[in-house]
Amino acid sequence: MASSLSSSSTTSPLVYDGIIFDMDGTLSVSCIDYQLMRQSLDIPQGDLFTVMETWDDGDRILRSMDTILEIEDMAAGQSKGMPGLEELLLYLQEHPVKVGLVTRNTEYSVNAFFESIGHEYRDVFDIIMTREFPYVKPDKRCLTHFADAWGISPARLLMVGDSTEDVECGNAAGTATCLISGGGNEITSEDDKTKPPRGTIPSFQVDSLYELQQRLEKRDTKLGWNELSLDDRAMDAGAPFQGLEFFNFMFESGAVQAPACSFPRLRSTILETDVDNMHPGDRILHLGCGDGSLTKMLFSAGFNCVGADVGTSAEKARTRGLATMAIDPTLSKIEEEIKEQMGDALFDAVVFLQDHPHNSSTATALISSTQALSSLRALTAKGTGTCIFEVNVPSNDGTAFSKESFVSTVATPSGWTVMSVDQSETTLRCILLNA
């Protein structure tokens, strides 16, 4: 690829202060045989890393990673830039915009990519992040790292990629997202006409790097979710996954132990490092997991998360490669159901967010059933286990609900210690400790 990179930025600013690109299928022509990879690993559906993180067999993980590396190395030898790449990089070089690269591929493959297009183009990128970095897509921390390093609000950044994980990561981090078609790793197949889950819908979509450059030139783009008007939010384009605020609350409250990296069990096996020394995330039971949007984000952020819901909902989450189980939503048999399917290992936390009408039975049980809360306490670690939930305040029976009543008649009699309980006009958010 010929080069005529300029050394300074002289033209007017873009809509964005920073643009972050995926590599395979976005900047480079996708040469990775994902079908062969899935067949070889026996993972027909779901995100590969998410599924592998659920495995207890370390030897299987190592064998599978060897297979992935072999297929990636074969593809690296065929690496070449996408049509329109040189023009786009030159265009960005002429504007005052930060440029980053984030890929779940290896440093070796990144070097092969620059070898094919010209190593001078590496200087266009201010930050290059491979899977050797602690945070991996769709863990939103890999993109907030760019925002922090550059001192730029996430809403002023654009994440460009060709996969579900690219869009999920950007939407969760608060950046704008652009899905580029034709990379070979799109969100859905052409014959799949179902609407993707909230959190996987990009801010906008293009068919090529040429079209992306045209839209940047015309400023025909969108900012991140937090800077969109209500009208622009109508179709959920660029929306974060359902439960992001609750997700952030769990981190910030200290009610769960944040992991030191994405996919810690996978990483510890590959690096032959004691996972206990890597401060892995807590083991979490996610009640009412629904389509798995929140479960997947917990999982990708390093938590050892198991989803639980009624049969049909649990199956939806399972198709995304998540560990899930079917339960009675009233929680009347929750202790027996969990132990029968998961054994006697205790959880560090039980979490629940009422975000769909189908899990109203679970919400009711959490705020009214001493038996249900007692059963959940029996599933958590003594002294450190927590129960964190957010439910809609009941208002249709004519009786005013109060957090004081919940604490005195339900939470305390069930054996939990109430760490915090906050009630608004519409919700009750609570942290309980198995002291």
Image (cartoon, helix red, strand yellow):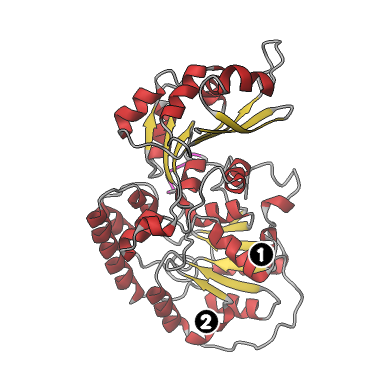
As drawn, the label of residue 122 is 2
Mark 1 or mark 2, which is nearer the start of the sequence? 2
Q: Give the camera-side residue of 282 and 162.
A: 282
Q: Give the camera-side residue of 87 and 66.
A: 66
In the rendered image, the vertical position of residue 299 relative to residue 213, given as above or below:
above
Query: In x, y percent, where is residue 100?
Result: 57, 71
Q: How many marks?
A: 2
Q: Amino acid at mark 1?
A: Arg
Q: Give the camera-side residue of 404 and 198.
A: 404
In the rendered image, the vertical position of residue 434 relative to residue 397, given as above or below:
below
As drawn, the label of residue 271 is none
Is-magenta flag for residue 290?
no
User: Mark 2: few, some, or many residues within 10 Å (few <14, many ≥20)?
Assistant: some
Q: Is residue 392 visible?
A: yes
Quadrant position of residue 60: bottom left
Stretch of the chain drawn in magenta: 189-194
At 28% across and 56% down in the image, what residue appears?
61
At 29% across and 62% down in the image, what residue appears?
65
Quadrant position of residue 92: bottom right
At 75% across and 79% down in the image, what residue appears?
11
Query: In x, y percent, where is residue 187?
Result: 47, 51
Q: Would residue 430 be found to the left or right of residue 424 on screen?
A: left
Q: Mark 2 or 1, which is nearer the eye?
A: 2
Quadrant position of residue 8: bottom right
- Secondary structure of the residue carrying tag 2 is helix
Residue on which disc 1 sits: 215
- Secondary structure of the residue carrying tag 1 is helix
Q: Would residue 31 be found to the left or right of residue 408 on screen?
A: left
Q: Would residue 270 be found to the left or right of residue 302 on screen?
A: left
Query: In x, y percent, where is residue 377?
Result: 46, 28
In the rendered image, the vertical position of residue 126 relative to residue 253, given as above or below:
below
